Amino acid sequence: MSARDNLRGALVALLSMGIYTTHDVIIKHLGAEYAALQILFFTSLLSFPLLSVVLLSDPTPGPLRPKKPLWVAVRACSTMGAMICGFYAFSHLPLAQVYALLFASPLLITLLTVPFLGETVGPHRLGAVVVGLAGVLVVLRPGQSALEFAHLAAFGGACCTAMGAIALRKLGRGERRVVLLLWPILGNLVLAGVSLAFTYRPMELPHLALAGVIAFLSLCAGFLMILAYQLGEATVVAPMQYSQIIWASVYGWLFFSETMDGMTLIGSALIIASGLYILMRERGAGARATAVGARLGPG
């Protein structure tokens, strides 16, 4: 690909990340009033009109039944886990801390390629993983600051994202994208719907509209990210995910009076540097680059 194509891909990816961060800010705003699973339920419910448009415009014929049900199920469960953990973490933690922990997903993907894809991880990439996970510990600061369940949820979101990426690699291009979008949303709808019996609080109309905005922004950002990978090389597009730490710092300061402390900054730098190093090693080896912290679906 030409330098111009790579530049266009990077700029589109930056826009996608900005939209995703805006989406997460709305989740955090609603999380001050409602349970995370309730927000997820209405976001999933309001995703269906948008998904119907995607389904009607999908030129690929075929049923909505998965061709590889096992790996579609793994991917759907991973997506559901990532979304549940993400919604909870964004509702309870500063934005920058959540992103720092979610950025561990490419490091975890590197480890998971060994048992699930039979790939070999050399000493350079393994060392980068160790440094990145050390960065996670710097952000968490066990023993120095109180660890909340939301911290575990954020790291759990990174783990689920990594497993979802492995499932996508296993599926290849054999499944229709609409199938990959549909099943996690259905799962979220059922799981979060059950939780409403315990956590439901009537939503005001403006807040319900914001849940619809979350669904819309997720779909827009997801398609922009697909376009970005079509325009540019993965090793150019993937690092744009890390721009979210900048978006998070700005949004956190503007709307939530959040500031990034020194330890979060140091830990984030270690995690980001490790992820970039892994991408560069894969590029040098001619391997297909791992998408950094790829978002797995609407919401």
Image (tube, rainbow, N blue to C red):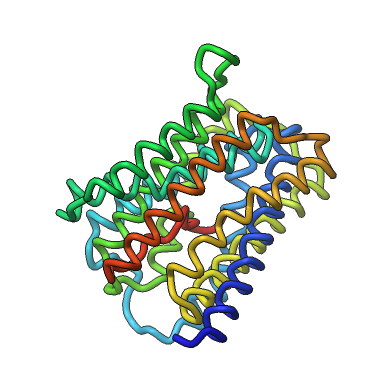
Q: Which residue is drawn at 83% across and 35% down?
A: 257
Q: How far across and down, in percent of the image, does residue 247 sit?
A: 71, 52
Left or right of 252: which side holds 181?
A: left
Number of numbered discs: 0
Q: Residue at x 75, y 33 (%)?
A: 33
Residue 260 falls in image quadrant: top right
Frontmost residue, 50 versus 232: 232
Viewer can see residue 221: yes
Frontmost residue, 235 versus 108: 235
Left or right of 60: which side holds 149?
A: right
Residue 213 falls in image quadrant: bottom right
Q: Is residue 267 above or below residue 145?
A: below
Frontmost residue, 48 versus 132: 132
Q: Which residue is drawn at 81% across and 37% down?
A: 256
Viewer can see residue 193: no
Q: Is residue 281 above or below residue 157?
A: below
Q: Is residue 47 above or below residue 155?
A: below
Frontmost residue, 228 versus 273: 273
Q: How far across and down, in percent of the image, does residue 50 sit?
A: 60, 68
Left or right of 292: which side holds 19?
A: right
Q: Which residue is drawn at 39% across and 40% down?
A: 159
Q: How far across and down, in percent of the image, does residue 144 sit?
A: 57, 13
Q: Which residue lies furthest to the top in this view?
A: 143
Q: In which quarter of the image is the N terminus?
A: bottom left
Q: How far across and down, in percent of the image, does residue 155 sit?
A: 47, 35
